[in-house]
Amino acid sequence: MKESQRVEWKESWRDDCLKVICGFANAEGGTLVIGRNDAGGVAGVKDARKLLEDLPNKVRDILGILVDVNLKKRAGREYLEIVIPAYTNPISYRGEFYYRSGSTNQALKAASLERFLLRKQGRTWDGVPIPRVRLRQLSRTAFATFRKLARLGPRNDATLQREPIPSLLDKLNLLDGKLLKRAGVLLFHPDPERFIPGAFVKIGYFRSHTDLLYQDEIHGDLFSQAKGTIDTLLLKYLKAAIRYEGIQRVESYGMPVDALREALLNALIHRDYSVSAPIQIRVYSDRLSIWNPGELPEGWSVDRLMQPHASKPYNPLIASAFFRAGEVETWGRGIQRIFEACEAQGSPRPVIHYETRDIWVDFPFAPEHLAAVGDRPTDEATSSGTKEKTGKKTKEKPKEKFEGRTKEKTGDRLQRYVREHPTASTAELAESLGLSRMGIEWQIRRLKRLGLIIRVGPDKGGHWEVFPFMGGTTPITTLETPHEHRPPGQVTGQVTGEVASEVARAWGTVPRKKTGKGTKETTKEKTGSRRGVRK
């Protein structure tokens, strides 16, 4: 029997082993072996027979569960196997909840604890009611959009057209008594971020992995976010290859619009809104990437996701509303539809990456499209631009080695450590990373300013949350981006660096570097209107 997700070895019994038992009980169950060392050898337990009598009572009295304790013997040495079943109700150890994930035992805090408790109760995050939200505060435009989509969609649900708003919300199962559920706020409130931080979409155009040229944010109800994001991407971020069929003008993009729309709807519907980071879309010259915080159904892998499967939405109420609006199916065919759309257009299949609570969908653009619009892959374009500026090749520096792997920057090491140890204190971070207290505090302030980490809760009892990188670390200037066509939803944008300077010159404005009091800007002349900058 090897150590695994459901097996752990301990050389001797300590009361901390109750945390491991608690973690197994809250997950899929498992076996704790007392008397085996880390190498798997039987070390034996001196007081095995006494523990055989004491442990079942101790586990019952402290955790409130029953376990099987079995005495085993090998090579003349006695050891114990404690078999823990999975429990449907949440189990705590001295007020703390633990959960077995992989080969580690995790203490559940904040959002992860809420998700765990809701799952044990058979509830979902989007079904929790929010107090102090009045129906009169909801967006009439969002309801009109929903009704229009439902009328024009494949289901053509006429009953939704005549229902007054309270009855419509009740039919969509968005009310808990007189309280509106979280799903209802996301779907129909004009500013859901008042109640759910991070409930918006962020788009950025990158010249390289770290060089952000400009960005936009799409706010509002989820229906507005869906349309506004697609419109903004097509009007501003993606280049269209144009051809003519007879007199008909035909535009095509590096990826099928239907596949992009399906991937965006998946992100909006299935993301984990308890994480206060927005959906992030990174656009490069040769690809588009969508990141959203979320998790796969328990026991699923990316391989399972890419095969035919049943529909298991993370937010079933939100998914149901989009289904009633005719925007999605509920057959678990979203990934297959994306693949089919890409194959029909001759575009490469997207690549799906999944790490702990991070889901990436990368759409590489078709080589034929890149050739048609005159773009090169991002890395090639970046290196070529460097050669043109310097007039000669830049000799690549050899990578430094650090403890057997590529040397990491301090900020990267800090992010990785707090991702693995979210409850770490400042003192623990300083000691683990080999920094002074002042040095670690400076790094934390820097990462907070960049929006890469936040501290949730107090210094004692709180935890860290880590977000993926979404911008350059050294913005030169910032300037509000104009929009010739402002799509539905609230769209805000920024351009940075050289692009900001170019736009400023074109408009007769000169942006200055950021100061502690904000960005200053001088205007050469006032204009009645400003035309949008289109790629």
Image (spheres, rainbow, N blue to C red):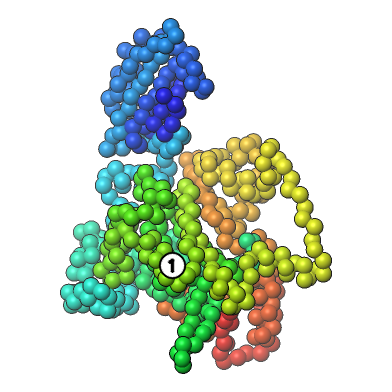
Q: Residue at the top extreme?
A: 76
Residue assigned mark 1: 343
The residue at the point 28 percent across, 60 percent down is: 331
Q: How many marks?
A: 1
Q: Residues within 10 Å of mark 1 (few under 14, many from 20)?
A: few
Q: Quadrant of the N terminus?
A: top left
- Residue 112 in view in this figure: yes
Q: Quadrant of the C terminus?
A: bottom right
Camera-nearest residue between 431 and 384: 384
The residue at the point 58 percent across, 48 percent down is: 415
The residue at the point 55 percent across, 52 percent down is: 453
Camera-nearest residue between 132 and 304: 304
- Residue 531 lies in what quarter of the image? bottom right
- Residue 213 in view in this figure: no
Q: Position of residue 105 (x, y in %)?
A: 44, 34
Q: Position of residue 405 (x, y in %)?
A: 67, 41
- Residue 527 lies in what quarter of the image? bottom right
Q: Secondary structure at mark 1?
A: helix
